[in-house]
Amino acid sequence: IDMSPEQLWEEGIFGDEAPVGLMPKPADPQSVTIDFLPMFMRTIQKNGVNIDGINYYDHLLRSKIHMVDENGKKKKFIFKRDPRNIKYIWFYDDETKEYFKIPAADQSMPDMALWEFEKLKADLKERGLGRIDSMAILEAYEELHKQIEESSKKSKKARRAKQRIKNRDREISAQPQKPEKSVTADGDEAFWDEDISDLAEEW
């Protein structure tokens, strides 16, 4: 296009040839953020909706349970999930054109990033746990954060000990050292300048 994307954007917005002008700001800025979150298509069951083994439910989903589409099949709805916190998801109601926040069915589930959840599942599988439910995830989550906290304390303790050693060595090196006498080739003791000046004062 012989120009940068930014230049083309500016030309389309402000250029001489059919400029469109600045787009109107969205009435709900949060909806713009949600639009760019990862999307999942799911049917809604009696226990809500399931994504990666986590059930999400809210009473506003009741009217959508077992809903069918124009082909007579169970209708799939749009759900969005923020990987920074999977404790809740966003449900898009195609009738009202709005997003609604749907929490995890298990209210004891803590705020959890997707990477934490995937690590917990991997750890539980390594232990040979066949069925991974919310209780197992919660226990593993608490154990993981306990290990992180203990590791953090140990690291701080190690850093403090290392700093104390550095401070000690610095104090030792800063202490004045009295010059030692050396021995000349003929076996007599040789004095340093400090000793010679002392003798001169005595004379």
Image (spheres, rainbow, N blue to C red):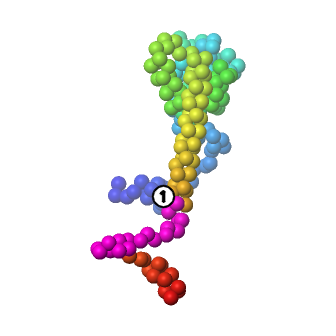
Please determine whether, in this image, residue 131 is positioned above or below residue 172: above
Give residue 65's quadrant in the image: top right
The image quarter containing residue 45 is: top right
Asked whether residue 98 appears in the rendered view, the answer is yes
Above-or-below relation of 200 to 35: below
Which residue is pictured at 63% across the width and 14% down the height?
A: 47
Residue 90 drawn at (x, y percent): 61, 29
190 or 103: which is nearer to us? 190
| Residue name at image x 49 percent, y 14 percent | 129
Residue 70 visible in the picture: no
Name which residue lies at 51% across and 32% down: 115
What residue sits right under mark 1 in the picture? 10
Q: Residue furthest right?
A: 59
Residue range highlighted in magenta? 172-189
Within the magenta stretch, is there residue 188?
A: yes
Please tell me whether residue 40 is drawn above or below residue 4 in the rendered image: above
> Which element type, helix, strand or loop, lies under badge 1?
helix
Q: Nearer the viewer, residue 32 or 24?
A: 32
Q: Position of residue 43 (x, y in %)?
A: 56, 17
Q: Amino acid at mark 1?
A: Glu
Q: In the image, is 135 to the left or to the right of 177? A: right
Residue 141 colored in magenta in the image: no
The main secondary structure of the magenta stretch is loop
Residue 202 in the image: state x and y as whole percent: 53, 85
Residue 93 found in image quarter: top right
In the rendered view, does 16 fall on the left or right side of 157?
left
Residue with the most extreme bottom position: 203
Front-most of 137 and 79? Answer: 137
Which x, y percent locates residue 123? 48, 23
**Dot 1 surroundings within 10 Å: few (below 14), some, or many (20 or more)?**
few
